[in-house]
Amino acid sequence: MNHKQALHKRDQLTADLPTGELLRGSLLQRTIRHKRGCPKCQRGEGHPILVLAVSYAGRKSQQMSLRPEQKQMVEKWLKNYHELRKRLEKICELNHVLLRPEP
């Protein structure tokens, strides 16, 4: 791949990067159970909840409870984050090509 091709490919990858709607973490479904007074929990059913779990290097992991109506938005933002990371890796590879002298 020559410099011109690498620049063209890099421009394509950066053209429509999602920049604002990004979210890092994992979407989990948990079940909470009350110790007493809840018939549903006494039957062993519990209450399903959505949780966003995020871990940071050198820090404690954080978890945030989400409302059911937030699920679709959170899934989209997580997908955008993973897509951005893939594109960044490709862009870095293309920049390595651009650092090499052209024959």
Image (tube, helix red, strand yellow):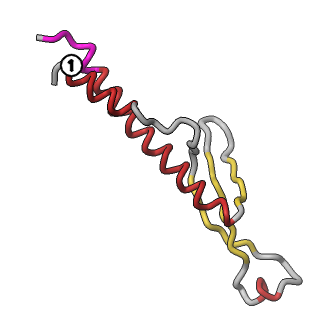
Give left or right: position of 81 versus 89: right
* Residue lying at 28% horizontally and 20% vertically, measured from the top left: 96
Q: Say what secondary structure mark 1 lies in.
A: helix
* Residue lying at 33% horizontally and 27% vertically, measured from the top left: 11
> Residue 53: percent from the left, percent from the top?
63, 52
Q: Quadrant of residue 16?
A: top left
Q: In this view of the protein, which residue sits in the foreground, 17 or 23?
A: 17
Residue wearing tag 1:
4
> Residue 81: percent from the left, percent from the top?
50, 43
Q: In this view of the protein, which residue sits in the foreground, 1 or 7?
A: 7
* Residue lying at 61% horizontally and 44% vertically, measured from the top left: 55
The amino acid type, in three-letter code, at marker 1 is: Lys
Query: Compared to 32, does 23 lie above or below?
Result: above
Q: Quadrant of residue 34?
A: bottom right
**Which corner quadrant holds the N terminus?**
top left
Q: In this view of the protein, which residue sits in the foreground, 75 or 45?
A: 75
Query: Compared to 84, does 96 lie above or below?
Result: above
> Residue 89: percent from the left, percent from the top?
36, 33
Residue range of the region highlighted in magenta in the rendering: 96-102
Give left or right: position of 36 versus 98: right
Give left or right: position of 95 versus 17: left
Query: Compared to 53, does 39 lie above or below?
Result: below
Query: Compared to 37, does 71 lie above or below?
Result: above
> Residue 84: percent from the left, percent from the top?
45, 39
| Residue at the front extreme, as displayed | 15
| Residue at the left extreme, as displayed | 103
* Residue lying at 74% horizontally and 90% vertically, measured from the top left: 43
**Which corner quadrant holds the C terminus?**
top left
